[in-house]
Image: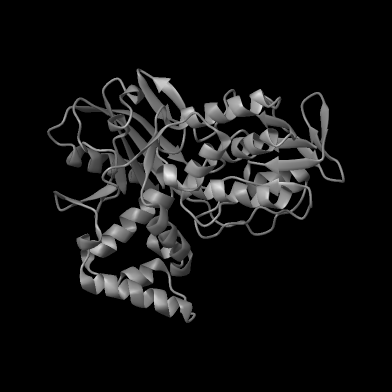
Amino acid sequence: MKVGIVGAGLGGLLAGAYLSSEGFEVEIFEKLPFAGGRFTSMNYRGYEISTGALHMIPHGRRGPLGRMLKELGCDVEIVDSKPEGEILWNGEREMLTRKSFSWFDVLRLNIEFFMNKLGRKRTLEEFARGLSEKSYLYVRSFLGWSFSIFPEQMMFEKIVPIFRRTEVYGGPGVPVGGCKAVTESLVEIIESSSGRVHLRKEVKAIKSGEKAKFILEKEKKEYDLVISDVGHRITSELLGEELGNHPSESRGVKYTIAIDEPFIGHTGVLFVLGKNIAGMNEVTNADENLGRKHMLQVHQPLRNGSREEIIRGLRDIKEILRGYSFEVLAVQSYRGDWPVNRVMAGMDMGNRTRHDNIFVVGDGAKGEDIEVDGIALGVENVLEALL
């Protein structure tokens, strides 16, 4: 069976690696000059600057993406974070554990779980407003770091399965070699199974039918099955169809910082409470080859992507790193057709289209998990329908 995949992002590469390993004839078309989309990196002055996502996998080697990479035989080592996280609040740092929060806040959380089962519908903002200041600010920081959203943008019920998965799989991990190591390994698997990844090849249109056709610049390609990794909106445009209402995207900005000496000092996340920025990690503690010196990645959710929001984030960084010698290497803002998520967390549009042989994977078709682990679950949903 011949499979055509639009987009060589993480979702497209994961699907392509599995299907090519199962004997499908796979071709992937990517309009950019590199594979990986927002899950790879570019070397700049001796630092691996990630193109979109952080050099971090939400549940490390234990979660959905880590498991899938292991099943595929990817030659990627994932260093699970120790500790999983810390909190920075009022200038003080503390380890992130259950004891970080009062028994009252834990009780309120359990009551909310129970009320949710009974049908109560509230946003995370409505729930979190009943917590202590520290817990409320942590909810904001966690959502900003993990999803690039604010508490009023997500219903409590949508966080429940993600919370449960975090209990099972735990916290994050850093792939040695960064995001690029993951995508390069997937490309190698595809090509070693006689699949092909075409770069600088843009699919101009998709013609649906029993055999779907890709319209390229100077040729047409015919496939039994099509998988799109460019989101529901662009997929509909390629098909010449009306999508209807499309959920909001999520927006964010990532700051990559070179710093002379370690600031965080471990491989986990430092959640920043009460600031514009949501958190940071220091990936060179897991893989020193990711930076010539030490490298911090800082993430901030954005409401409108204005210059003023980014200036406030830079002020936060300057305040937090006071006394350290550092340099901001890159400020990368994500929105439009290159957002943090094409569909905001909790508003997933699923993997199916109106066509039996056309599927969607990627950041708008995630399963119920965080970022790239959610993308992996979405790919699994498609594979279950096909294999």
| Nearer-the-camera pick, 242 or 53 | 53
Q: What is the quadrant of the N terminus in the image?
A: top right
Q: Is residue 330 left or right of residue 215?
A: left
| Nearer-the-camera pick, 74 or 278 | 74
As drawn, 384 above or below 223 = below
The reply to whether residue 335 is visible in this rendering is no
Residue at the (29%, 38%) spot, across then down: 267
As drawn, 319 above or below 243 = above
List x then y, in percent, for residue 170: 37, 52
The residue lying furthest to the top in this view is: 45
Dividing the picture into quarters, in which one does residue 207 lie? top right
| Nearer-the-camera pick, 130 or 119 | 119
List x then y, in percent, for residue 91: 14, 49
- Chosen colour scheme: one colour
Residue at the (59%, 38%) spot, across then down: 14
List x then y, in percent, for residue 88: 20, 50
Dividing the picture into quarters, in which one does residue 114 lie? bottom left
The reply to whether residue 21 is visible in this rendering is yes
| Nearer-the-camera pick, 380 or 236 | 380
The residue lying furthest to the right in this view is: 210
Residue at the (29%, 35%) spot, across then down: 282
As drawn, 192 above or below 372 = above
The residue lying furthest to the bottom in this view is: 118
Dividing the picture into quarters, in which one does residue 263 lie? top left
Q: Is residue 39 left or right of residue 219?
A: left
List x then y, in percent, for residue 322: 14, 36
Residue at the (54%, 55%) spot, across then down: 248
